Structure formats: structure tokens, C-alpha cells
């Protein structure tokens, strides 16, 4: 399980897991209240489900696993955080059943899976408002994509807030410390393409936090003039330690905050995105994996609320279940 830290570096237990426990109790009560005539109640199901990949999606899969194992204690679900790219390497080598991803699979990864006979399907499990964050004491409220690119693009010479052109807030010429993920991260891939126009293109002189998204929260919380980018769930869990910036929508010109509503209606652009899992066709032939994926989709509202993610729309849920069904049917 991924650990959470406060801005003093002390380990704290996330409220997310208290919510997961509560929701698990509610689900267990609901199952018992149904009074099924099947006395086994799914208790005969057993096996191990191996998941690895995105550090963004991992807490969501951990929440799904926690809740699923309350219903099916004979099934063990393990969740690793090798990053989206690292997760696909393991998945396409046949080492995992499901790969967590915060971006779509890329052509070289598709070819790697194909060469090893791994069939798969992209299944959306949540939405995310990838958030550009600053310290709460920073007066900046909204930035354009162009201004963010000034900071993060390859060869950028922006070292202070005064170097950013067109800011309306009075930020003086304070030094800007930057925090972001490593190159194995799907968040890194998505952000660089959406902001800089090409995946992987970015400045190299920033505080690289690898797969520890809390490194962004801690760094920005401790420095009035720091800036970073991080998945929405980490902002929600920070309890006000960081401030997410509004992003000017490139089409409407309006400043839009990252929220559940703005992600679902696509107005938080270009940093609203889908989050995915990739099950293999072989894995879905195992009943425990199929039941887990079906549970993941059917209980999406409960899981995303427990893990502080943006839930899928009804249309997205239907599409995800269709993809699981099609992969099972071959």
C-alpha cells in the first residue's frame, strides 16, 4: 500500500483507507442482507491477481482490491507501482494479469505484447483532473497552457515567477522550485504531450520525485513559490496543503478549476484524462480476475469515492463492461 506523509515528513494514515473500510463494511452488510440461497456466497473463489503499473491508478486499484477481498477473502490481489511504462514492460512479458495505466498503451508496448502473444483490452476505471499545484500563499489563481509550457518546455530558462510572461498576479521575481514525476510515469507522458505538444519533451532541471506523487505535495506545501503537477486524488488528500490552479480552457478562454464536474463535462482541458486498467485475455479466463474486473466497474462509484477519484459516467461504465465482455468472449 502506498504511504502518505504530511509536510513534516511524518507518516500518516490516509483518510482514504478509513473510507475504504467503512465502504467495505457497507458492502458486506448489503451482501448478507440479500439472503442468497447460495450458502457458498462466493467463498469458494480463490487465487492471486497480479497488478502493477501507474502510481496514479495504484491507490484506486488498491481500494478496489480492499473492497473486493472483503467479499472474496480467498482471493489475494497484489498492486505494484512500477509506473505506467514499467507496468507495461511486466505486463507484456506475461508477469502480471492487469496493468494500471494513466495513459493509453503506446505502439512499441503493443508490439511487445503482440510478440509475446499477450492479448489485452483498454478498460477505463476512473477520470482524473491532472492538477498544476502551487502553495496556498501563492497569489496566482489561473494560468494558460502557454504559460505552463513556458515553465516546463525543453530548454526553458524560467527560473523565477518574474520570468513567466503574462501573469496577472503580483508575484515579483521569486525563485521557482519545480516538482514533477519521473520518465516512467504515465502522468509525465500525458502532461508533457498536453502542455508541451510532444510526449517526453520537458526541461530536465526540476525535482524529480519518481513514482512518489506525495513528493510533489510535500515540496510545494513547504515552499511558497514552488510549483508542480500531480493527480487530482493527491490534491484532495492534501487537505489544503497545496492549491490547484485553474487552467484557461484553450477553446472557451475561461479559467476552469479541476473538479469532478469539469472533468466529466470535459471543460477542464487539456488536463482532464481517463485512467485505465489493461487486463490480459488469458487472465480473464480465470474466474477470480473476471469477477474482480466486473466488480471494479459495477462498484465504480463506491470505489472512486473511497479513493477520492473522479468517477466514470454511466456511458463510460457501460463501455468498460463491454470491453471486458468482448475480451472474455475472444
Image (cartoon, rainbow, N blue to C red):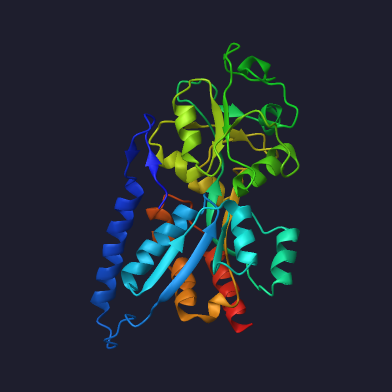
Residue at horizontal 56 percent and vertical 41 percent from the top: 210
Does 68 sit left or right of 229 as displayed?
left
Residue at horizontal 30 percent and vertical 82 percent from the top: 41
Does 289 sit left or right of 193 as displayed?
left
Q: Nearer the viewer, residue 181 or 187?
A: 181
Does 297 sit left or right of 71 as displayed?
right
Q: In the current view of this chain or complex, which residue is farthest to the top?
A: 172
Q: Is residue 36 visible?
A: yes
Q: Nearer the viewer, residue 322 or 76?
A: 76
**Number of numbered markers:** 0
- Where residue 225 appears, x then y in whole percent? 53, 20
Which picture quadrant has residue 170?
top right
- Where residue 29 appears, x then y in whole percent? 24, 69
Quadrant containing the C terminus in the rendered view: bottom right
- Where residue 116 appears, x then y in whole percent? 69, 72
Q: Is residue 102 visible?
A: no
Q: Is residue 322 above or below residue 90?
A: below
Q: Is residue 252 above or below residue 175?
A: below
Residue at horizontal 75 percent and vertical 60 percent from the top: 107
Which picture quadrant has residue 167?
top right
Q: Is residue 186 above or below residue 201?
A: below
- Where residue 19 appears, x then y in whole percent? 31, 53
Residue at horizontal 63 percent and vertical 60 percent from the top: 88
Q: Is residue 324 above or below residue 308?
A: below
Amino acid at each position: 500500500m502506498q504511504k502518505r506523509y504530511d509536510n513534516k515528513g511524518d507518516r500518516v494514515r490516509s483518510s482514504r483507507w478509513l473510507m475504504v473500510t467503512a465502504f467495505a463494511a457497507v458492502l458486506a452488510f448489503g451482501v448478507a442482507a440479500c439472503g442468497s440461497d447460495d450458502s457458498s456466497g462466493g467463498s469458494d473463489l480463490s487465487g492471486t491477481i497480479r497488478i502493477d503499473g501507474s502510481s496514479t491508478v495504484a491507490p484506486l486499484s488498491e481500494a478496489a482490491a480492499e473492497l473486493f477481498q472483503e467479499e472474496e477473502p480467498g482471493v489475494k490481489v497484489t498492486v505494484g507501482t512500477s509506473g505506467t511504462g514499467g507496468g507495461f514492460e511486466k505486463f507484456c512479458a506475461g508477469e502480471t494479469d492487469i496493468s494500471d495505466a494513466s495513459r493509453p498503451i503506446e505502439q512499441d508496448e503493443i508490439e511487445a505484447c503482440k510478440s509475446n502473444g499477450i492479448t489485452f483490452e483498454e478498460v477505463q476505471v476512473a477520470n482524473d483532473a491532472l492538477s498544476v499545484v502551487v502553495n496556498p500563499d501563492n497569489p496566482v489563481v489561473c494560468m494558460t497552457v502557454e504559460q505552463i509550457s513556458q515553465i516546463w518546455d525543453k530548454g526553458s530558462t524560467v527560473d523565477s515567477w518574474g520570468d513567466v510572461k503574462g501573469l496577472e498576479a503580483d508575484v515579483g521575481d521569486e525563485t521557482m522550485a519545480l516538482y514533477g514525476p519521473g520518465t516512467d510515469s504515465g502522468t509525465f507522458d500525458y502532461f508533457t504531450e498536453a502542455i508541451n505538444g510532444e510526449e517526453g519533451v520537458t526541461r530536465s532541471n526540476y525535482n524529480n520525485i519518481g513514482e512518489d506523487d506525495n513528493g510533489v505535495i510535500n515540496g510545494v506545501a513547504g515552499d511558497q513559490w514552488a510549483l508542480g503537477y500531480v493527480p487530482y486524488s493527491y490534491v484532495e488528500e492534501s487537505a489544503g496543503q497545496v492549491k490547484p490552479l485553474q487552467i484557461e480552457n484553450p477553446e472557451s478562454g475561461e479559467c476552469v478549476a479541476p473538479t469532478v464536474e469539469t472533468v466529466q463535462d470535459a471543460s477542464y482541458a487539456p488536463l482532464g484524462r481517463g485512467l485505465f486498467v489493461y487486463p490480459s485475455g488469458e487472465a480473464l479466463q480465470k474466474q477470480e480476475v473476471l469477477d474482480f474486473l466486473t466488480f471494479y466497474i459495477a462498484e465504480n462509484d463506491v470505489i472512486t469515492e473511497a479513493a477520492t477519484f473522479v468517477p466514470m459516467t454511466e456511458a463510460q461504465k457501460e463501455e468498460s463492461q463491454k470491453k471486458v465482455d468482448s475480451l472474455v468472449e475472444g
